[in-house]
Image (spheres, rainbow, N blue to C red):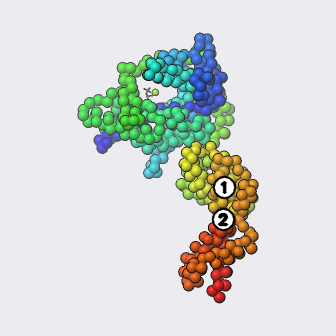
Amino acid sequence: MNNYEIVMGLEVHIELATRHKIFCRCKNTFAKRPNSVVCPVCLGLPGALPVLNPEVVSCAVRMGLALQGELDRDSRFDRKNYFYPDNATAYQITQFYRPILRGGAVLVQTGDGHETVIRIHEMHMEDDAGKLTHDPENHVSLVDFNRKGVPLLEIVTEPDFRDADQVIAFLEKIRMFALYLGISDGKLHEGSLRADVNLSLRKAGTDELGVRTEMKNLNSFVSIRRAIAYEAKRQEEVLTSGEKVVFETRRFDEATGTTKVMRTKEEVMDYRYFPEPDLLPVHLSEAYINTLKEQMPEFAPEKSMRYQSAYGLTEEEARILTKHPATAQLFEKTLELWTETGASQLTARRAKSLASRICGDLMYLCREKQAESGTWKITPEALCELLKMQEAGTITAKTARDVFALMFDKDIRPMVYVNENHLLITKDEDALASAVDAVIKAQDKSVSDYLSGNEKALWHLLGCVMKETNGQADPAAVRQLLLAKLAQLKG
Ligand code: ADP
Ligand code: ZN
Ligand code: MG
């Protein structure tokens, strides 16, 4: 790829998690039973009229603010005409002439710390189509209209991407916006975030855009990376052999890692866009925009900076804590509860220990259980209770970790649990003394090793006493007592 530069632009679809569909009162939920969430509007029955769901506008405006573009105060809907069996109206309602957002910019950072501004061309609202299932064995195709009318935002970028890392960083940022705004779960593999990649090559050092292809069916970051690598190489081979790249839509095939022609320029449809006569323009008042502006959340990059400067967390810790809003919320709420008690100079230390519990144990549990962030049962109240007990020295670090792991999928009150299971650190000094005596008697080899100057033998004896007390003894107290008894033996 020495002679050529890769140029890419994205078309990203975000499925919105609104309560209702975009133009009717059907629930916007994932229903297993086909055609169970449908009505005359989304089935395209004659005479049924669409009514715009205001939730969708709110999602669009907030995403528009995040993308820092120009919101059209009077955007419109248009009909994109085409027939397909999963689309009973024979047209899609989208925004073509007056999209709700034009322009915008997203700063993306790639692994090497390199920053690039990706310009947004436009963003618009539209409805999703239904779903076809082909059953070649029985020679039938089945159609399910549950998804018809699910609201979508489509974001179109300028051709500003030069490599796959930038594409993925951009999609991660869009997903971060969607999660923090609470407008979508942003899952690529479930289709709530979909990206089509337009890719062309041009001679390095030139400005003119080359002929592009569009790749569809990319449902993971891994597929996106593979598709880009394959397609760039394919186009390079076409160009170096003196041929021309054909403007076409290609489908990425997971199994072979290649892209295949889906439709060519000759098959590009004329959609005969015209203004949707059944819907009014979408008027946005300044007051409405301002209200939504005031409700904008603190996004991950700003949060991460704040965590680092306010609590002295590392960049890595702050990144992990802010990646998903549920994680950031657990961190912030727990710390807030914890700092209600005690001096403020403890805050940084507590933030650090809370951060390591979340970044270490919690993220490990999520990976192990293949659970999404936020699906855990851990509440800030319960976590705070646990951390307070550990801080006060009433439970050992090991007990804290064990109870925390249980809290992941069970609603546990740590204080109650610890009491019921006798996990409090043993304060019973007689019990401790007899445990130490028993170990000294049983481990005479280690004792004599220690007495003849082998300091390491003490570790073994310590471990034996902890075992003897089922881990419920305070290690510092055990150490003190052991040293005292051993000193007596020496003397
Ligand atoms: P269409 O109207 O055919 O969908 P657009 O002009 O809207 O085409 O562009 C669609 C996407 O393709 C945009 O993200 C744009 O940045 C990108 N794009 C356009 N031309 C090129 C090109 N020559 N190389 C790479 N990407 C391109
Ligand atoms: Zn409906
Ligand atoms: Mg387009």
Quadrant the C terminus occupies: bottom right
> How many C-alpha atoms fall within 10 Å of the one at disc 2: few (<14), some, or many (≥20)?
few
Foreground of the two, 70 or 242: 242
Q: Amino acid at mark 1?
A: Val
The answer to which quarter of the image holds residue 63 is top right
Instruction: Tell me residue 55's x, y (percent).
Output: 64, 29
User: Image check: 415 left or right of 442?
Assistant: right
Distance between the alpha carbons at the discs numbered 1 and 2: 15 Å
Where is residue 410 shown, x and y percent of the image? 67, 47
Above or below — where is 271 with respect to 287? above
- Reading the image, the residue beneath label 1 is 403
User: How would you rate the neighbour count of disc 1 (Cα within 10 Å): few for under 14, some for 14-19, many for 20 or more?
Assistant: some
Label 2 amino acid? Asn
Could you tell me if residue 156 is visible in this image?
yes
Q: Nearer the viewer, mark 1 or mark 2?
A: 2
Task: Let me know if residue 123 appears in the view.
Answer: no
Task: Single out the residue that lies furthest toward the bottom.
Answer: 491
Up/down of 461 relative to 119, above or below: below
Res 78 → quadrant: top right
The disc placed on residue 470 is: 2
Residue 96 or 374: which is nearer the viewer? 374
Depth check, front residue: 240 or 327:
327
| Label 2 within 8 A of ligand 2 by Cβ | no
**Quadrant where the N terminus is found in the figure:** top left
- Name the spot of residue 137 as percent of width and height, x first: 44, 22
